[in-house]
Image (cartoon, grey):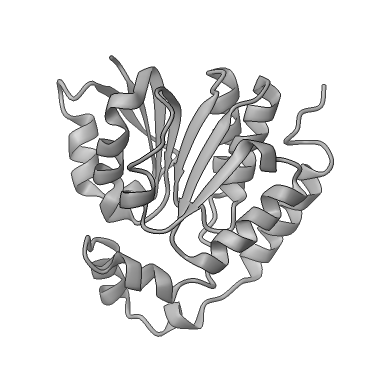
Amino acid sequence: MTTTLTNQPLAPLLDRLFSQAAAATSPALAGITNEERERLMHSKTEYLDFYGRLKDLWLPVSRETGTLLYMLARSTNARNIVEFGTSFGISTLHLAAALRDNGGGRLIGSEFEASKVARAREHVTEGGLSDLVEIREGDALRTLAVDLPDTIDLLLLDGAKALYGDILALMETRLRPGALIVADNVDYSPDYLAHIRAPGSGYLSVPFAGDIELSMRLA
């Protein structure tokens, strides 16, 4: 049995994009010391400047994480998905493929770097999934604060790590019981981890695959 993820045109497109991502470099990143990078990754005030300097860096999910996203969205029959941090759209393609195989739905992504938004939209169109995807350009604290579905089935957090808690707060009242939250590179967001793992937080949460936190909304 074939799926959208493993069939034309998406499978060869993802192979190409993962290869491009692996070969890409960022001169701006090479000029930042490890100490400065750590500081900026945890900053709630300098994230726009930091990620703007990395506009040529792909920052994709891994192949394994992409497959996991597809499986989670399929297995929960997700129809409404929100993605914080679209970059060039690799994770978007996996999630939209799941929506297609679920029979349809809506994926709202957010990316503040205009050049990445343009490329991600091109990739979504090439993958034949543009009817399912809306990518909003700008700061997610604003773009994801309005016009969201009443019910959200899956939330992917993969943008500025220091904002994970703030983005979750925007979604919290819309997450249905059983909704899943996938947070990538979550070690850079200790406040988010403390909240989502706290007793009585309303979530069941476990670390997964080294740098992912997989959480479920309980009520």
Identify the residue at image location x=56%, y=75%: 25
Percent coordinates x, y for residue 70 in the rendering: 60, 32
Residue 8 left/right relative to 55:
right
Foreground pick, 7 / 172: 172
Q: Quadrant of residue 79?
A: top right
Q: Is residue 190 above or below residue 111?
A: above
Q: Quadrant of residue 118?
A: bottom right
Identify the residue at image location x=64%, y=29%: 98
Percent coordinates x, y for residue 166 in the rendering: 24, 45
Q: Is residue 78 above or below residue 134?
A: above
Q: Residue furthest front?
A: 147
Q: Is residue 188 visible?
A: no
Q: Is residue 74 visible?
A: yes
| Image quarter (top left, top right, bottom left or bottom right) of the N terminus | top right
Residue 74 left/right relative to 203:
right
Q: Quadrant of residue 139?
A: bottom left
Residue 192 left/right relative to 112:
left
Identify the residue at image location x=47%, y=65%: 113
| Figure label count | 0
Percent coordinates x, y for residue 138 in the rendering: 41, 59
| Image quarter (top left, top right, bottom left or bottom right) of the C terminus | top left
Q: Is residue 186 above or below residue 205?
A: below
Percent coordinates x, y for residue 167 in the rendering: 30, 43
